[in-house]
Image: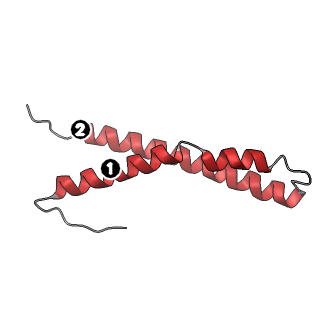
Amino acid sequence: MDTEKCGPDHIDVLDKKITALSDALAHLGKGESLKELLRIIRFPGYTTPAEFAFTASILDGMAMQIRLLETTGEHLLAAAKQVGQQG
């Protein structure tokens, strides 16, 4: 994690970080890898009980991470809105 200091270009730094994160989330939201996973799980022999347990557990963990990202983003936006605004 970056421990950058607030300097004269701090807005540019935040802009780049926010844009990069937004782009990454938009790309993630396309779900291409999960569409491929939907295809794979239909192959004959998928899944053994162990594969089912691993897959279900990982999917549950990914869903929890998405909910955490959504909540964290909502909290960040709510906090940002509390900052004084230029009038």
Asked which quadrant contains residue 3, the reply is bottom left
Residue 60: percent from left, percent from top: 68, 49
Q: Mark 1 points at which residue?
A: 18
Under mark 2, the amino acid is Gln
In the drawing, does residue 1 fall left or right of residue 51?
left
Left or right: 26, with 14 as reference point = right
Residue drawn at point x = 61 percent, y = 46 percent = 32
Q: Which residue lies furthest to the right in this view?
A: 45
Is residue 42 depicted above or below 1 in this figure? above
CA gap between label 2 and label 1 equals 18 Å
Q: Where is residue 61 in the image (x, y as percent from the top left)?
A: 64, 53
- The residue under label 2 is 82
Q: Which amino acid does label 1 sit on?
A: Ile
Q: Nearer the viewer, residue 32 or 63?
A: 32
Graded by Cα atoms within 10 Å as few (under 14), some (14 to 19) or many (20 or more), the crowding at tag 2 reads few
Q: Using a 10 Å C-alpha cutoff, classify the residue at mark 1 as few (fewer than 14 neighbours), some (14 to 19) or many (20 or more).
A: few
x and y, in percent, of residue 76 in the image: 34, 44
Residue at position x 74%, y 45% in the image: 38
The residue sitting at 55% across, 42% down in the picture is 30
Front-lying residue, 22 or 53: 22
> For the point 82% across and 59% down, which residue is it?
51
